[in-house]
Amino acid sequence: MKWTVSQLQKMRDSEVEIDQTIDISKDLTNRNSEIRDASPIEIKGNIKVDSQEATFHLQLKGTLILPCARTLVDTEYPIDISSTEIYSLNMNKISSDDIDENVHEPENGVVDLIPVIEELILVNIPMQVFSQEALNRDTLSGKDWNVMTEEQYLDEKQKDKKVDPRLAGLAALLDNEEE
């Protein structure tokens, strides 16, 4: 997914189709520890080049494996990202004040889409992902914990008030004192 500026200049006034699959799972897992794995990313789109800039219209599709926010089990999260990336081919003629934040500059005369694709994926990861199992559960619980409503809590508290049979006589005495 790299092109030199001279290669792009040869494509001037034409449209070139992009249809590639790349595996950047190691790069993604190194940059974000929440990503446990990633499928190869399918990239489709096109490149339009004119005298000043190269415009990349990209559609990224793939799957990330992320931890479920409730259970921490591996959860598949499909990604489907559309983006338009613009690279200026004449950066030396443009002053730094006129550069738009959305226009990228080729590094050492090379346009490399891999860092941009990685960034698009990382920015589109949600804060929380829930597995289907966690969404289908009526109660939330884990080892030594559970989430309950106030009513459930009060019911549980009533159950805890049951007196130990060995102390039943003492409980009867205390009940008489309260009255």
Image (cartoon, rainbow, N blue to C red):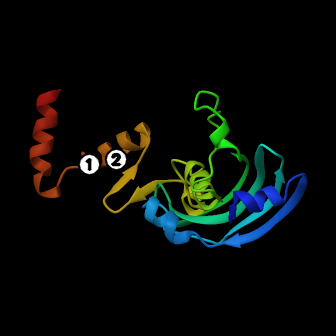
Q: Looking at the image, can residue 79 be seen?
A: yes
Mark 1 to mark 2: distance in Å?
6 Å
Q: Which residue is mark 2?
A: 156
Count residues near mark 1 (Cα–Cα under 10 Å), then give few for <14, some for 14-19, many for 20+: few
| Picture quadrant where residue 4 is located | bottom right
Q: Residue at x 34, y 63 (%)?
A: 143
Up-down relation of residue 151 to residue 33 (above or below):
above
Compared across the picture, whether 6 is left or right of 15 comes to left
Q: Position of residue 71 (x, y in %)?
A: 45, 61
Q: Which residue is mark 1?
A: 160
Q: Nearer the viewer, residue 21 or 1?
A: 1
Cβ–Cβ below 8 Å for labels 1 and 2? yes
Q: Could you tell me residue 102's position as x and y percent?
A: 65, 38
Q: Within 10 angstroms of label 2, few (less than 14), some, or many (20 or more) residues? A: few
Query: Relative to residue 14, is residue 24 depicted above or below?
Result: below
Question: Disc 1 on helix, strand or loop?
Answer: helix
Tell me if residue 73 can be seen: no
Residue in the image at 15% along x and 42% along y: 172
Say which quadrant the N terminus sits in: bottom right
Q: Quadrant of residue 107?
A: bottom right
Q: Farthest residue to the right: give it.
A: 14
Instruction: Give amino acid for label 1.
Output: Asp
Local secondary structure at mark 2? helix
